[in-house]
């Protein structure tokens, strides 16, 4: 081993950087999952790594696990450049269509990244819809070929929202996901989004759905974080001001405390797959509500495991910045 190799250490997903005196945390899009880190690294290398990627995806333990892995792949830039070659080479395989559909969903939202809907240009809207249409076509074809898969229906929830398919279709797609994968937490997260007023819903229905989902799940389920998610969405709609009194309202505090007690603070909570999402959601909610006593243990468990959402609501360009700031406040 050369002396230069001793100056380099490995970080999440195989990236290297020169050894620093103080480690700089970053958002790990693989959530510490070795399988997902391997898939993401392979996806960046291109089409020659498809056999490895396919093998890992095919080995997913269930519909929710496959969705989790695909969500990791969809954010890898460049997948859209080579996945079409795989589809052409393997025309009878549904998995390349599923990967393509998932990637086109993320790529579509990238066309309008950083812009509220009212600031998106006509050209951006056109590109957004074009990419979502490709995603719809590929996901529907994958769903037809593999009728037991939940993952196509999960991503169709998102494409449908972007294309404005309507509440009836949205409900059917959510139900289709859950029939194939009961208790699909990520599908419930997407449905919370769907029920928000910005997508044609109402706050009453959003909060009711979040609480109903929590109560229907076993104690210790991550479903409880849907309640915090719903309140963060309403806080955001009210302006997303860190000084807003909304999250400190007594009724909101009561609802979020109940949800935390049934999920992240429950002894039966299991840290599986994307568990940092639930912890970060509650940590941010408690922090903004001014309850650092309840936020502190969550930050302590998280360590450096910041997630892009929901911290992007405070800083869309650098979500890690508010995470570190609030973690430091909680440590005082």
Image: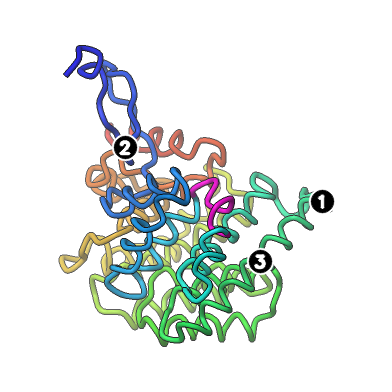
* Residue 82 within the magenta-colored segment of the rendering: yes
Indicate which disc residue 20 carries.
none
Q: What residue is pinned by disc 1?
A: 123
- Find the distance from the CA under tag 2 to the CA under tag 1: 36 Å
Q: Which residue is outermost to the right?
A: 122
Indicate which disc residue 134 carries.
3
Mark 3 neighbour class, 10 Å CA radius: few under 14, some 14 to 19, many 20 or more: some
Mark 2 neighbour class, 10 Å CA radius: few under 14, some 14 to 19, many 20 or more: few
**Main SS of residues in magenta:** helix
* Residue 325 within the magenta-colored segment of the rendering: no
Question: Is the residue 321 above or below the residue 119 in the image?
Answer: above
Dot 2 or dot 3: first in sequence order is 2
Q: Nearer the viewer, mark 2 or mark 1?
A: 2
**Picture coordinates of residue 269 (x, y %)?**
21, 65
**Residue occupying the point 51% across, 81% down:** 143
> Which quarter of the picture shows residue 317?
top right
Which element is circle 1 on? helix
Q: Are marks 3 and 1 in contact (CB under 8 Å)?
A: no
> Which quarter of the picture shows residue 268?
bottom left
Which element is circle 2 on? helix
Q: Can I make out residue 310 in this image?
A: no
Classify the position of the C terminus by image quarter: top left
Residue in front for this viewpoint, 246 or 124: 124
């Amino acid at each position: 081993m050369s002396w230069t190799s001793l100056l380099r250490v490995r970080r999440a997903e195989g990236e290297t950087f020169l050894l620093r005196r103080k480690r700089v945390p970053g958002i790990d899009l693989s959530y510490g999952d070795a399988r997902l880190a391997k898939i993401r690294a392979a996806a960046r290398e291109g089409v020659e790594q498809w056999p490895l990627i396919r093998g890992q995806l095919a080995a997913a333990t269930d519909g929710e696990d496959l969705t989790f892995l695909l969500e990791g792949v969809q954010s890898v830039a460049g997948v859209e450049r080579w996945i079409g070659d795989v589809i052409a080479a393997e025309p009878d395989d549904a998995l390349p269509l599923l990967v393509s559909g998932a990637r086109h969903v993320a790529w579509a939202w990238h066309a309008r990244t950083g812009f509220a809907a009212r600031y998106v240009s006509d050209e951006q809207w056109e590109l957004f819809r074009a990419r979502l249409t490709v995603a719809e076509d590929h996901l529907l074809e994958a769903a037809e070929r593999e009728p037991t898969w939940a993952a196509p229906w999960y991503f169709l929830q998102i494409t449908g929202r972007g294309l404005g398919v309507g509440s009836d279709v949205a409900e059917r797609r959510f139900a289709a996901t859950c029939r194939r994968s009961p208790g699909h937490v990520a599908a419930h997260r997407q449905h919370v989004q769907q029920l928000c007023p910005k997508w044609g819903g109402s706050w009453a229905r959003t909060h009711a759905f979040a609480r109903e989902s929590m109560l229907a799940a076993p104690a210790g389920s991550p479903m409880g974080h849907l309640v915090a998610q719903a309140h963060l969405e309403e806080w955001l709609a009210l302006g997303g001001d860190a000084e807003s009194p909304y999250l400190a309202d007594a009724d909101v505090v009561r609802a979020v405390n109940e949800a935390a007690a049934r999920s992240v603070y429950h002894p039966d909570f299991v840290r599986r797959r994307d568990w940092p999402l639930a912890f970060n959601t509650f940590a941010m909610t408690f922090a903004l509500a001014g309850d650092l006593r309840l936020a502190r243990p969550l930050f302590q468990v998280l360590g450096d495991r910041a997630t892009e959402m929901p911290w992007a609501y405070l800083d869309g360009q650098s979500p890690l910045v508010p995470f570190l700031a609030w973690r430091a406040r909680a440590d005082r």
